[in-house]
């Protein structure tokens, strides 16, 4: 699929900011199934300094500073993105989930690099702690001897079926215990929940931030800016690789999903962070468009 | 050591029952004979004799105390600063043994530098299975944001390294731990050496001990060469968490010794990709940061968001190479206690060498075999949880419930735990002034290494380290923290021949920065000096007034008229006039003919000594001390002695119950303050720093004098000669008055002396002139040809004073019009002077708002 991605973040401050240092993780990364071209980052006011680097997880990070008085900040990314089917389409693995846990616990001297790299994602992270009650929640999916992939997909459906999508309920910092208790949340909470369950069982799971193409209700025209950032998870399948799951929609991500980056949890891939002097209160608005491009259109 | 008959030799007396210990002892060998390398020192000690040793020990304590060698475990109560004892007997090591130890320490620094370079670079140690990922990634010292762009590393990450070592019972070395973020103790080690050399010159002058000064010179050279700019004089700053941190004394000491600017996070700002220091003259670029704050607090943009100690954007500035931070941010991962279990293998694989210095036996519980062993033998091990730094678990000292919790967390998150074998250290002699004998002590040692300044630009495999030939020793069981110890010792590394004596004090270290106190004075320092002046002066004024009031109280008690003056004096001291019932009830019954009124007034006056009164003397002194500590590196040693002497006055002050004792405290305080200000005037360069101190002081004095005059001549309930006398005595002008006017006290003469006479340092005229002169010499940020607000305010007050028609003030006692005229005059003077303080602050001090986060993420925290 081909998409034109447009993502704008706008901050309006109640008083002037004299100096701000920022870090943005909003440039999509290239992947075997995802090519990004014509990527443009437009920041207003124009940053006094801007540097791009690659972080620990391989994500693209842009540092920028604005060093003169400003009362608003506008960060827009545009990119043309081509996605292809994930490898998962013809995926086959019959490893049992306990065996997978065992693979992740081998003596480091007697295992492979993929497993060693994945072990970081078994551990607790700033937002997600290993908890026995998280393992308990997932236990019915992970019955003894069960095939790992089947169990993971069942957990994915379980969260989708049992939880209500409710943007009013949670904030960035809603603890997983509250999410689990109320059975409400947004994509970020569901991704954190799935990851928390998997890690608490001893499996490796990471957090993916990105976008998803949405379709307007039947018969209606798609509104500009109506899309949103999205978040989902992926699980390490020893001997094969990372399998993506989307507990918010109860499905496996396909060509309609665009990956920005990944990390241990939301804290590693916060789209825009900043420390500023002044500014008072601020109002945030975000607009995302994932516009599908027809083959013909892109040829023109 | 043959002794004739039964006579006891001085050495035997000194040793008492020292001998007879089975484990390794530094002084006595297995035959209980003194080891060869101790002989020289032992002879010197014996020839000094116990009496001299006792008196020298006291001398050492006094020197430490006067120099304010303190460490402050996070409490800002000025009375609570702890000072440790310094043993006059050092820890001694022979040349041969030192060479072996030194080689091991140098290897260890090289190994850790290799490891750090790899952990934040290719991470081969993890991918090749040498280090379990769980060991590194669960440690709070591993910083993900320090792990990107590995190719940019072209300077050493580990510049200084502190290693804690003991000699064990069998005489072998064991490394206990490493400090790799900002190793503390070099300053204390040098201060100890300087102090002992002063107290025991006969021993220190000719002893064949290796000198320390060269190491600090190398350290300076090393930091200067880290700068990537080609500037001749790189700007090196020492970044401290501030006066509230335990190591602040040492931060100030090092900054002073090495001639670095002592800064806090607020003093620095990242602009245009560079770190700059906010100074009176504007922003000054910083090339090298010697940081004394821990990794996670360095940068609220990329690390802990809630850090107020750090500098937003610092990591990016370091990444782009415009500034170098020593040690590199992220080096804290090397402090992981569990690494010890892997070092022998890492040494073979990274250096291709065998590890020379063994570590204390360590098991990392993340390995299943180790976990099983630790769970079996829980009582034999000391456990540490890396998510709770500083916390130590000893199963043999825990209750059943705590033990169950420990076993459960050990089982749940084994990789967070490291088990260390309990060890007993060898013994070493120390002199106990009470028993006047040498006694066996258990100590821990800290040694310091530094990357060779000439190897800075070489690749990691060719970088070598040098070790300071000395260190710090402290009393306590193996591994007890330095800051909790009560006694420290000097460390002597013996040289084959006597070493040339190099002065440790204030040698020029490389190029001298001549503008140290000029425009590159940090704004924060200027502000602290200003408030130091104001609080010092306020303390002085209040103290003098209280002293006169107490004298008055004693005097009036003997007179029939009663305490007529005291209500006015209480007003001047801002002591509330009405005491509540409860406090009245508390007044203890007093025998004899002392009146109830006396008791009440006395108690009100003595309230000024109490700790809880917000405006009481101890509270003012608290502000004074806080500001003085924030500018520690700008005040001379003698000035510090004056402050420490004040501190001793205040230690006992809040318990003051009697008038006479109170008077004595105040006498002492007034003299110490005079010494303080006098020394500031005599020893501080008359640059901007001193000017701000002086301006603060004279703004305060102007305001308090004007208020006092207003009270005495206009608003007092009982105006008249007795009150005027108090005013003159408070300003120490009574004698001057008598000599000059040779008359009864007269209001106009008082006004002449205290308002108009520009030659009298206590007159408003003099103070305004002085303020005018000082303010004119402050740096002006713009180059405007017009007078700034501060100058205009002083001119306004001065003109008001100059334009007074003295005739309108005549006959103050009888004429209401004259009193009105005086009131108006005083108010017209008070107003611009009150504004002046704000104007100075507005023009010169940085008003750093706390940086705010765009997105505030509170980590959910471990439940």
Image: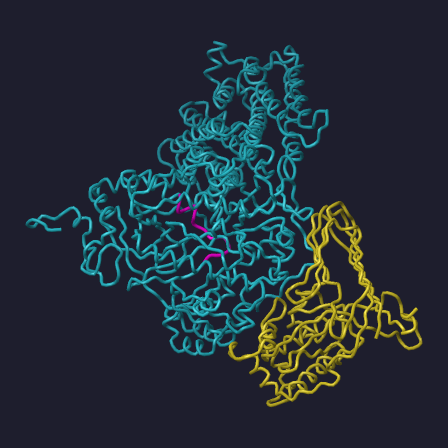
Chain colours: A yellow, B cyan
Q: Is residue A229 left or right of residue B145?
A: right
In the rendered image, the quadrant that contains the C terminus of chain B is bottom right
* Res B330 quadrant in image: bottom right
Residue positioned 27% across, 38% down in the render: B202
Residue B736 lies within the magenta run:
no
Residue B683 place in picture, x, y as percent = 47, 29
Is residue B633 positioned above or below B718 on the image?
below
Q: Which range is magenta?
A: B178-190
Residue B573 place in picture, x, y as percent = 52, 31
Residue positioned 77% across, 50% down in the render: A14
Q: Residue furthest left?
A: B5
Q: Which of B827 and B9 is in front in this view?
A: B9
Q: Which of B767 and B800 is in front in this view?
A: B767
Residue B672 place in picture, x, y as percent = 43, 31
Residue A47 place in picture, x, y as percent = 76, 51
Is residue B806 positioned above or below A95 on the image?
above
Q: Is residue B265 left or right of residue B47?
A: right
* Res A150 quadrant in image: bottom right
Is residue B829 positioned above or below A231 on the image?
above
Q: Residue furthest bottom?
A: A145
Residue B188 lies within the magenta run:
yes
């Amino acid at each position: 699929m081909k998409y034109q991605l447009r993502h704008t973040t706008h901050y309006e401050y109640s008083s002037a900011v004299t100096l701000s240092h920022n870090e943005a993780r909003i440039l999509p990364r290239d992947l075997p199934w995802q090519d990004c071209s014509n990527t443009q980052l437009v920041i207003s006011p124009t940053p006094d300094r801007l540097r791009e680097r690659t972080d620990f997880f391989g994500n693209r990070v842009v540092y920028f500073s604005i060093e003169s008085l400003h009362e608003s900040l506008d960060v827009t990314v545009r990119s043309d993105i081509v996605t292809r089917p994930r490898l998962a389409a013809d995926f086959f693995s019959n490893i049992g989930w306990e065996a997978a846990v065992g693979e992740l616990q081998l003596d480091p001297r007697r295992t492979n690099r993929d497993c060693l790299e994945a072990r970081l994602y078994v551990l607790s992270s700033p937002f997600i702690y290993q908890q026995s009650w998280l393992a308990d929640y997932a236990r019915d999916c992970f019955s003894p001897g069960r095939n790992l992939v089947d169990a993971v997909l069942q957990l994915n459906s379980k969260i989708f079926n049992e939880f209500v999508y409710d943007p009013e309920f949670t904030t960035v910092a809603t603890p997983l215990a509250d999410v689990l208790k109320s059975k409400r949340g947004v994509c970020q909470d569901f991704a954190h929940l799935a990851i928390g369950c998997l890690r608490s069982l001893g499996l490796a799971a990471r957090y993916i931030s990105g976008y998803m193409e949405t379709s307007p209700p039947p018969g209606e025209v798609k509104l500009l800016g109506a899309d949103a950032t999205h978040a989902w998870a992926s699980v390490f399948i020893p001997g094969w690789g990372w399998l993506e799951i989307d507990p918010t929609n109860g499905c496996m991500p396909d060509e309609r999903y665009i990956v920005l980056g990944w990390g241990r949890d939301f804290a590693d891939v916060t789209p825009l962070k900043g420390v500023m002097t002044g500014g008072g209160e601020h109002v945030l608005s975000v607009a995302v468009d994932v516009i599908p491009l027809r083959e013909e259109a892109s040829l023109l | 050591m043959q002794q004739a008959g039964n006579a006891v030799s001085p050495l035997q007396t000194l040793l008492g029952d020292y001998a007879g210990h089975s484990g390794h002892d530094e002084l006595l060998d297995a035959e209980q004979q003194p080891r060869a390398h101790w002989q020289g020192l032992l002879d010197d000690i014996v020839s000094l004799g116990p009496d001299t040793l006792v008196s020298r020990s006291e001398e050492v304590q006094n020197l430490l105390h006067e120099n304010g060698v303190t460490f402050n475990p996070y409490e800002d109560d000025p009375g609570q600063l702890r000072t440790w004892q310094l043993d006059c007997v050092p820890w001694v090591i022979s040349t041969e043994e030192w060479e072996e130890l030194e080689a091991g320490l140098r290897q260890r620094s090289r190994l850790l530098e290799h490891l750090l370079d790899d952990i934040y670079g290719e991470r081969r140690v993890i991918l090749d299975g040498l280090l379990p990922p769980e060991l590194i990634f669960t440690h709070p010292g591993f910083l993900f944001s320090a792990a990107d762009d590995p190719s940019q590393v072209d300077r050493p990450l580990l510049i200084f390294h502190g290693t804690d070592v003991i000699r064990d019972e069998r005489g072998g070395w064991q490394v206990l731990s490493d400090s790799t973020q900002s190793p503390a103790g070099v300053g204390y080690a040098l201060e100890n050496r300087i102090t002992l050399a002063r107290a025991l010159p006969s021993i220190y002058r000719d002893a064949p001990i290796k000198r320390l000064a060269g190491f600090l010179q190398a350290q300076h050279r090393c930091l200067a060469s880290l700068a990537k700019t080609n500037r001749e004089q790189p700007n090196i700053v020492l970044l401290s968490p501030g006066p509230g941190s335990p190591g602040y004394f040492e931060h100030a000491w090092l900054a002073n010794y090495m001639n670095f600017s002592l800064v806090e996070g607020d003093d620095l700002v990242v602009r245009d990709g560079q770190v700059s220091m906010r100074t009176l003259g504007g922003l000054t670029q910083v090339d090298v940061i010697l940081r004394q704050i821990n990794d996670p607090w360095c940068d609220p943009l990329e690390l802990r968001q809630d850090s107020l100690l750090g500098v937003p954007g610092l990591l990016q500035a370091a990444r782009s190479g415009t500034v170098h931070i020593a040690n590199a941010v992220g080096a804290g991962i090397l402090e992981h206690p569990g690494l010890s279990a892997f070092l022998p293998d890492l040494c073979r694989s990274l250096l291709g060498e065998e590890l020379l210095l063994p570590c204390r036996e360590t098991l990392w519980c993340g390995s299943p075999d180790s976990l099983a062993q630790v769970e079996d033998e829980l009582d034999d091990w000391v456990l540490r949880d890396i998510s709770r730094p500083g916390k130590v678990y000893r199963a043999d000292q825990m209750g059943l419930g705590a033990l169950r919790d420990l076993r459960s967390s050990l089982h749940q998150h084994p990789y967070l735990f490291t088990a260390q074998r309990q060890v007993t250290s060898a013994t070493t002699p120390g002199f106990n002034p009470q028993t006047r004998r040498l006694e066996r002590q258990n100590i821990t040692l800290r040694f310091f290494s530094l990357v060779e300044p000439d190897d800075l630009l070489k690749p990691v495999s060719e970088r070598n380290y040098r070790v300071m030939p000395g260190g710090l020793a402290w009393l306590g069981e193996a591994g007890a923290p330095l800051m909790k110890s009560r006694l420290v010792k000097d460390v002597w590394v013996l040289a084959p021949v006597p070493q040339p004596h190099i002065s440790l004090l204030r040698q020029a270290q490389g190029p001298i920065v001549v503008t140290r106190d000029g425009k590159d004075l940090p704004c924060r320092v200027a502000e602290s000096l200003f408030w130091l002046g104001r609080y010092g002066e306020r303390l002085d004024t209040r103290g003098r007034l209280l002293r006169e009031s107490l004298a008055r109280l004693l005097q009036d008690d003997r007179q029939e008229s009663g305490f007529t003056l005291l209500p006015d004096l209480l007003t001047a001291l801002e002591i509330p006039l009405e005491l509540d019932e409860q406090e009245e009830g508390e007044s203890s019954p007093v025998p004899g003919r002392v009146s109830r009124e006396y008791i009440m007034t006395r108690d009100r006056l003595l309230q000024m000594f109490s700790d809880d009164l917000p405006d009481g003397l101890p509270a003012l002194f608290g502000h004074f001390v806080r500001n003085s500590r924030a500018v520690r590196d700008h005040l001379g040693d003698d000035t510090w002695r004056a402050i420490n002497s004040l501190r001793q006055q205040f230690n006992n002050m809040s318990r003051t119950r009697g008038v006479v004792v109170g008077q004595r405290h105040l006498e002492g305080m007034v003299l110490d303050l005079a010494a303080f200000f006098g020394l500031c005037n005599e020893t501080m360069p008359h640059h901007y720093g001193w000017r701000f101190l002086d301006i603060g002081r004279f703004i305060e004095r102007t305001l308090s004098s004007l208020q006092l005059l207003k009270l005495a001549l206009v608003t007092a309930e009982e105006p008249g000669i007795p009150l005027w006398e108090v005013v003159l005595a408070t300003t120490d002008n009574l004698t001057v008055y008598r000599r000059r006017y040779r008359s009864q006290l007269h209001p106009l003469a008082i006004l002449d002396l205290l308002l108009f006479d520009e030659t009298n340092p206590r007159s408003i005229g003099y103070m305004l002139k002085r303020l005018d002169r000082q303010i004119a010499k402050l740096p002006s940020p713009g180059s405007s040809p017009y007078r700034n607000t501060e100058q205009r305010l002083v001119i306004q007050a001065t003109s008001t004073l100059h334009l007074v028609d003295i005739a309108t003030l005549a006959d103050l006692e009888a004429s209401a019009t004259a009193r009105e005229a005086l009131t108006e005059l005083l108010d017209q003077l008070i107003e611009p002077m009150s504004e002046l303080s704000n104007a100075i602050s507005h023009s010169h001090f940085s008003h750093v708002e706390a940086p705010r986060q765009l997105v505030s993420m509170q980590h959910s925290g471990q439940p």
